[in-house]
Each structure stands twice: as C-alpha cells, then as structure tokens.
Image (cartoon, rainbow, N blue to C red):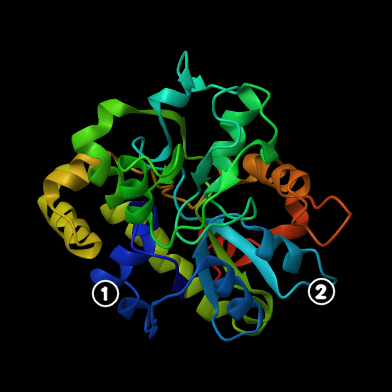
Amino acid sequence: MLYSAPAQSFMSVLLADHFKEFDKENLDVELQIVPTTDGSVLTAQGKAQVQLSGFNAAAFNLLARDNSPLKYTTTAAQEQPPSEGLYVNNDFVKDGNIDPVKIRGQQVSFGPGAGSFGSPGAGSFYLAAKKVGLPLDSVVLANIPGSIDVANALIRGQIAGGSLFGAAVNVLQPEKSRFTLVQQSPPIALFLSNSQWLKDEPEAAAAFFRAIMRTNRTYLQGDYLADKTVLDAQAQILGSTPENVIQSGLAKYSADLDAANQKQLFPVYQNMFREAKVLSYDKTLTVDDIFDESPVAAVRDGKY
C-alpha cells in the first residue's frame, strides 16, 4: 500500500493501520511512502497492490492503455480539510482571486516535488486560473521538494503562490494575513489499484476495502476530532499536535465509500492535463474507463 505523505485526507488508511483494522481481516498490509508518480508506476507493475493518491497524469496515461494495469477503486476522502488549497501572496490577489496581470511570470508550486501541471496539487491553481481567464503558461512552476518547503518559500517571498496541505498550512499560520486562500483543494484523494490484483484476489481486495469502510464508519464520521482517541491518533500519525490538527479542520469521509465527488472532478483533471500537454493519449476517457468498484460493491452486497 503506497502513499505520498501523511495527510489528514489519507486517514482512512492511516487510522486503519493504527487501530489494527487490517488485522481483523487477516491482512498483512505494509504501508510505504513513495512519490505519487513513482507509486502509480509501481502499482501498475504489480510491485504494490494499492496506491493512495490524487489524480495525476502518470496514472491517466497508464489508465488509457488497452487492458490498463490500473483502475481507480473508490474515494479516500470526500472533501479535503477546508484549510488546504492554493495560497497566494496578497500582492498578486485582486478581489479574493488571482490577479491575472500581476501573477504573470511569477513562480508557483503545487506541492511536494510537483514541477508540472501533471500533479494532483495543480488542480486548485487550474480552477483558480479558470475563474480569471489566466492561461496555464502564464506562470513559472517551481519544483519544491516538500509541502512545508512550499510554505517556507511563500513566507520568504520566493514564490507568489503554492498549494499547501496538512502541516504546511500550520507553518504559514503566523503570517497568514499576508496570503489569501484563493481556491480550496478539490477532493481528489482516491484508491488506485492494480487491475490484475482485483481480478486474481477479489476476496483480499474486498477485505482491504471492508477494513477501510469500517474505519470510516467507526472513526471518521461527524465531528470525529471531538473524540480524543481519534484526535491523538491523528496527531501522532501526522507528527503534529492536537491543536494543529483541529486548526486544520475536518476532511470528510464516506461511510459507504461513495466516489461521486471524484467522478465529477475526473473530466476537469483530464482537461487540465490535456491543456498542459502531459497526456500521451488522444482519446477522451470516461469514468467507466478508469473505475473498477467491484471490491467495494462486494463489500456492500456482503459477497465476501
């Protein structure tokens, strides 16, 4: 099971591991942190069975292949925490939006290692740019190694805007008045699965997603941060404090793993990747092309 970094929107997996929900399914799940693009390739190769990630161009290019080695399976988080998204220095903001004149030629960053519009974190900039008619090539992309580094680059004035997630938002907090959250992060956290694994081991796949569904229902409904056990677990997982976790706000999780929000966003990201010329295919993929929800359906139907 691969993921890019500890994040509140990844808590369905991280809490499942913390509270031993996989053990209840007799599953031995090993979590590994790898960059998003690398994770998609490793999952396609069958070196991992599942990746937790956002929409990214590398995955889309693999999904477009005949007999694709990958399929999106279901939602990770229905909504990102409200504090996460694209923060822009107020010098480049007009009426709460990006100033399309002043931001031209400025540097922006979309999160850890994101040097292109093929990354998940680019979505908030894309949506913000569309509001004001700003072409994607109007800004310079800064490849910054970590989300906290993006926050520090904003504070130092090295970049005009950046996508911030998790603890990086708290780093910005002391000087937050200098910046505007112009676009909240879209809810694109998803489970991406190896297609052959879904076919060859349907009971194991169902058991994995049953543990995820049970975690969502047990620990991640309503104001779940009011539960000290859950709050302390999240703080420990994120290497943060309970106060900072509360300040970041609630991500929202589906009790029955309904991926409707992500399905609605898929065409938006495909359009962005196409405009940015980072897709290797010409056809237009549909939601049916990229999703295989069979293990989730098996859990809902009580098949396994």
Residue 1 percent location from the top left of the image: 46, 76
Give the residue displayed 82% in from the left and 62% down from the top.
280
Give the residue displayed 10% in from the left and 51% down from the top.
228
Give the residue displayed 34% in from the left and 58% down from the top.
11
Say which amino acid is labelled 2.
Asn
Q: Secondary structure at mark 2?
A: loop
Mark before the other along the chain sequence, 2 or 1: 1
Number of numbered discs overlaid on the protein picture = 2
In-image side of 260 versus 195 (left or right): left
Q: Which mark, residue 20?
A: 1
Say which amino acid is labelled 1.
Lys
Say which of 87 and 39 sits in front. Answer: 87
Q: Secondary structure at mark 1?
A: loop
Q: Which residue is mark 2?
A: 67
Say which of 237 and 22 sits in front. Answer: 237
Q: State the CA–CA distance, disc 2 to disc 1.
A: 34 Å
Residue 111 percent location from the top left of the image: 46, 53
198 w.r.t. 163: above or below: below
In-image side of 261 versus 266 (left or right): left
Give the residue displayed 60% in from the left and 71% down from the top.
40
